[in-house]
Image (cartoon, coloured by chain):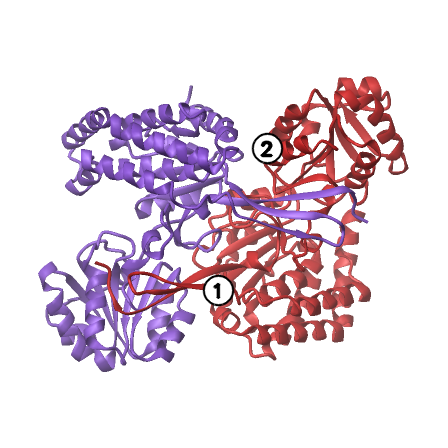
Chain colours: A purple, B red
Amino acid sequence: MSIQEDVRALCLAAREAVPSIANTDGEARNRALLAMSAALRARTAEILAANEDDLSRAEENGVPRVMLDRLRLSAERICGIATAMEALCALPDPLARSESWQRPSGLSITRQSVPLGVVAIIYEARPNVTADAAALCIKSGNAVVLRGGKEAIATNRAIVTVLQEAIAGCGIDPNAISLVTSTSRESADALLQMRGLVDALIPRGGKGLIQNCVENAKIPVIETGAGNCHVYVDAAANLDKALRVAVNAKCQRPSVCNAAESLLVHRDIAEAFLPRFAEATRPWQVELRGCPRTCAILPSAKPATEEDYLTEYNDFVMSVLVVDGLDEAIAHINRTGTGHSEAILTEDTAAAARFMQHVDAAAVYHNASTRFTDGGEFGFGAEIGISTQKLHARGPMGLEALTTVKYMVTGDGTVRE
Amino acid sequence: MSIQEDVRALCLAAREAVPSIANTDGEARNRALLAMSAALRARTAEILAANEDDLSRAEENGVPRVMLDRLRLSAERICGIATAMEALCALPDPLARSESWQRPSGLSITRQSVPLGVVAIIYEARPNVTADAAALCIKSGNAVVLRGGKEAIATNRAIVTVLQEAIAGCGIDPNAISLVTSTSRESADALLQMRGLVDALIPRGGKGLIQNCVENAKIPVIETGAGNCHVYVDAAANLDKALRVAVNAKCQRPSVCNAAESLLVHRDIAEAFLPRFAEATRPWQVELRGCPRTCAILPSAKPATEEDYLTEYNDFVMSVLVVDGLDEAIAHINRTGTGHSEAILTEDTAAAARFMQHVDAAAVYHNASTRFTDGGEFGFGAEIGISTQKLHARGPMGLEALTTVKYMVTGDGTVRE
């Protein structure tokens, strides 16, 4: 079979598995999650052996260290994944939401939450995503088609085998958790074409991967992840608070999408704030790339290009711009941002309200770090990704984002006049 | 300028108009709606004159009568459009929904409904859509980019001019209602590429138009409309009710997406039901295309092909299939349906529950006509279309479908540990 036919057969099998997972109650889905976590714990050695194969192949192929770190599993990490699955059981059943009403026509209408059906996830060489995404899909009654990065293929095969056997033991069709085993570019591209078989695609990974999915998919996509996030220090900022928040937003974990990439500073406060910020970020050797006014205040800063203001570094690098006022900050953010997370630091509540109203982003912050944009921090209990688009879901996506609705309408021979 | 540059400039102008409409309160938006409806009433003659131009050009070009009927406006139709705009004022403000909660981190989080931003509508030569879509977008705080069919271009220009002047008088940037005046295929295709400028595209029209948008858009699309809807007459149906509902679903208005296209009949009841159905639909001269068992019972039926069972006729034609039982009906519907509206006619509540649970469609009906799938009939007060996809919105879309959410987060120098 060609890769296209292979992928189609896999998606068809996943689609045929939908009734066995979609028509279960919340307790049955929780039992499946517990079986999955128990199987991961029991078969840790098997998974780690497969992971060793992936790691030694990746090392031979000169895969960069940061990617090796993401690829590497350990008994502790597998234990953490299993614990997270067990924690999912405690969350409310996302399929239990419904509301009903009557109409003058005599109809009784119920709007019921239901699974999406088949969810596809395209991601990079992070085997934890394999297990996490499968668990979230099972909890929400969906079948899942997983297509991970080629470096992790042996680990992904091992994890999916373990999980399939676990759900099969609970009476669920094992194809409800399916893995695309071809890791060529063609297999991802084939998945993007599966209209009628895949109900939603969630790409997770770097800019190139997401862009390819968004631009080429013929199936509905939920765009995630890109975060060119700003912190704006207003003229009325409390400098101590501002310093604490700006340093946290940049330095606490720079590799993630909700880390700040750009610092905007009101001109009235720039001379007071920028040297303190440069000093405070010194332990992390943050490279600052600034506008001419920034460079005049901070001789250590390098000149920034327009490209810098559009770049998500995911690293200890930050662009800096001194602005003439709030509205310039808002306009700059709306022009260069990715609609992820944007913060204003100020004691002026009117300025904060204007910023939060006019900045077009999933999450807007007043006197708090952009690093809080996260399903756990927001109290959602689980997260399948952070949407940077506006349709369906925006910001951190919990289990609800893996559901849709169905209208169930009852009459008694009722017709439309 | 090329058509691409033209469309980009128009979308950019619409984007720049967003703050002037997005940051208004519900009362200001209602005042704009009243100004729009008053202007339509006052300038009816101007719009009808433009419509006459379109109609005479269309007649010269041999445009079919059914399309001429959709293109034709009258003083009554314009009055109806204006009245619908006024009725929108009475609906709740879709931007007024919010919920707030506290987190252990000290953050206060508000989830606030906000406009999508710029909404594009691509549609056929139906000038009523121009005014209706503009009104729904203004009510929900969105800028709209309209791209209608070429036959209606003069009418659309006249309507948009009237509406732009009306909102400008209310302090809203007139580009919040923008019309793509090139009606070549290239202008629609250019609109599909406007990433970063258009937040959502809603195609409204026939299968070809929608398919082109879904397959080629690089911006988020809400798929609407295709309805290969089934009515299944179960063994335990009350034949009088079943007859009334099946006839209504097929004949009351066959040209619309929620009309039934296919009749499924349980074998145990086929001999009793089919002749009565053929008799009852005779006044509309409905052409029945059936399976061999149908043709054996109804000599007047023509043999159906596999293609018939996949076809949305939008006409007085219906495919008919005799099935061995409920599960065959469910499987047939899930294989051939478009996920729009599906009905079971039965007095067996267990069969009805199984049908409604297992059929994968936006709306599932027990003993009621598929014709009820409609924002007005569901009680939503307004409708921008009927979604047949699962992301963002499913089924009839009210004003809420034109909104997204924003998380507004307040701390006091709060950082993530």
From the viewer's side, name the closer residue of B354 and A31. A31
Tell me the residue at 17%/28% (across/down).
Answer: A52
Image spot of residue B113 (x, y percent): 49, 63
Query: For the residue labelled by badge 1, is the local secondary structure a helix, a strand or a loop?
Result: strand
Q: Position of residue A347 (x, y in %)?
A: 29, 78
Q: Is residue A112 above or below residue B384?
A: above
Q: Is residue B205 above or below residue A161?
A: below
Q: CA distance from mark 2 to mark 1?
A: 34 Å
Q: Is residue B397 left or right of residue B106?
A: right
Q: Chain of mark 2?
A: B
**Badge 1 density bin: few <14, some 14–19, many ≥20, Cα 10 Å:** few
Which residue is labeled 2 in the image?
B358
Disc on res. B98: 1
Three-letter amino acid code at the position of disc 1:
Ser
**Residue at image location 67% in from the left, 74% down from the top:** B34
Image coords of residue A55 (percent x, y): 18, 31
- In terms of secondary structure, where does tag 2 sit? helix
- In the rendered image of this protein, does residue A1 appear above or below residue B356? above
